[in-house]
Image (cartoon, rainbow, N blue to C red):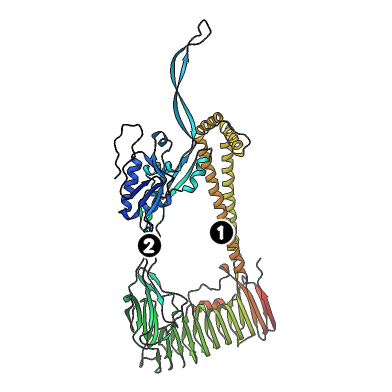
Amino acid sequence: MVTIISDQSSSPTLPIMPAFIDDRPEGVFVNLEKLPSEWNFRTFVNDLFAQGFRFEELEYSLFLKLAYPVEPLSKEDSFLLLAKKIVPFPSERKVLYKEVRVMNHGAHAEYMFEPVFLEHTEKEPVYGEPDENGEKPITGYEEQVHAEPTHLDLDEFIAAMWMKGVRYGIDIHAFEPRTEAKNAHRAVIARELPPTPGRDAELKEEYSELHRDDSPLIRAGIADLRRFKNRFPQISEGQKIVRKIPRILGKPGYSITGDVLEPIVPKDLNMNHVSGPGTQVEVINGEQYLLSTIDGFLTLDVKTNQISVTVKIENTEGISTRTTGDLYLTVEEFIEHGEVQEGRVVEGKNMRFSSGVFGSLISDGGKIVIDDSLAGGSAKSDGGTIQIKKRASNSNIEALGGSVEINYAENCFITAQTVYIGHAINCDIVARDLRIDISQGCAMAGCNVDIGVADIRRDNITQVTIFIPDMADFHQRNAKYDAAMKEIQLDIDDKLEEIKAFKSEPEFAKFLSLMEMIQSGKIKLSPAQEQNFNQMQRMQRGNIKGLERLVTEKNAIVTRLAEKRKEYDEFKKMQEELSSGRVCKIAKVTGSTLVQQMQTPYGIAKIDAPSTREIRNILRTRTASRLLVFADDRGSVAWSYASP
């Protein structure tokens, strides 16, 4: 607590300094060893300023570290120079510092800088009528108030702002240029220190043979392993799998009013939630590890967010009602050496079948490999791959967003992002990219179709449909963009006219012209003229704010136009990309073959129909709305789409 020694002089008495303040002739020092806490320092500062004193040549960065420390100060040098000295802060100087505006709950503060003047009073004589000698006698005196221009002082500013509630984050480097400005202007003079965020706890892979493409994420305090590479690397008993990296707490910040801004508490991770079968949590040298308890294969289960170690599942008895029934697998890899019976369902991820498959296979975006054949069944892996090495017959094969590769296919319905078939007979196929070595009686649709030989099969011709963009939608959206941009431009023109009319008011126009000449240096004002101009500026303050508001509104509309133009350019780029890559190549036509175009929204390789039967009918339909590219039983095709 700072106390005042009573004194009868007009100047305030220098207060008694607390134990941690050492006031020497060479400067004011802080003894860190005697400073109990930042609260004591802030109390000292507050009392000092309240009793009419301030610092001179204050080390502001040290001042903030003592009053609002983010990190503890090193006490290697216990005496730190805080300021040159402590001096009175006269009331006639205090009134120079106006109120400050605290914005956004203490995020920053704004101050109106304007020319300042010190007033002083002088007695001037009053003369009477001249006597017979022509001399005017002094009949009395009257007081005259004079105002002299002065400047704001940084040390005074810091003290004044402290008493007005701004106690942190004053931008001292921008202070002097602000005080030199000739015109009144509002500026940000202090900003808060945002809290430094911490770091969530996370898992670090410790097993060298694990794929490290993605690391585990923390969501709601639980490890989310969906980004791990989903496979089964072999691992030995006692091997470290992952290590927990503990969370790191953030550092607090301060608002300009000195309030503490606490950082968000980072998320923690419970290793026991990560540990699945075949693993255990152990603490080694103070750190938590997940270890394997058996020899086996790692499983990263995205449903339970657990890491497990299991032996590889490999079956030799086949899938049937007698052996296993339907299988719903959660392991990463499954190998079956026996047959899959008709009507049986196998759900998993990466699956391989060495014998024939007559049932249904469903993969969760993984790879299905059939070394033998698929007959009368189905295979589905959205986003994955399906490979049938021998033949597929009377089956449905679907890999939306993925790929399909078949050596020989007959009477199959196939859809995928990419399809390759060695020999296809009477198949119906939908794919973006499609390549067939030999096609007999197939109906297909895609964006990029490449056929080696196209032939007829009994009464079925080879029919190819190429997806092209529906330009009507493009034209409609282009027209909407054009209309929107024209409307915004009209808003800009209207706002410019409004600004022009606002600036044309005679007195305001005169003021703007004068201000422009002063700012450009064409005219220089004497002190008296400058005072008159300042008076004029105060009178025009309402018009100045009105003009600033109009300009701000105009700039917002200009920004909106720029954003709309950017959005339009991105749409045009997308339009060009969607219109490219539409190709049909047939090296040799040996039987009736038809190639046609079909418009879809943006040329997407998709047929909207509720059933496979209806998709088959659409593929084998020839309508006048589909532009004909080729129709013959001999020749070749080399066609590419040209966007109109």
The numbered dot on residue 250 is: 2
How far separated are the C-alphas under marks 1 and 2? Answer: 38 Å
On screen, residue 113 above or below 213: above
Taking depth in this image into account, of 289 and 566 the one nearest to the observer is: 289
The numbered dot on residue 17 is: none
Taking depth in this image into account, of 404 and 7 the one nearest to the observer is: 7
Q: Which amino acid does label 1 sit on?
A: Glu
Q: Residues within 10 Å of mark 2 (few under 14, many from 20)?
A: some
Q: In this view, does 179 lie to the left or right of 38?
A: right
The numbered dot on residue 567 is: 1
| SS at badge 2 | loop
On screen, residue 40 above or below 508: below
Quadrant of the snapshot with the C terminus: bottom right
Does the rendering let one see residue 67?
A: no
Residue 443 x %, y %: 58, 81
Does the rendering let one see residue 96?
A: yes
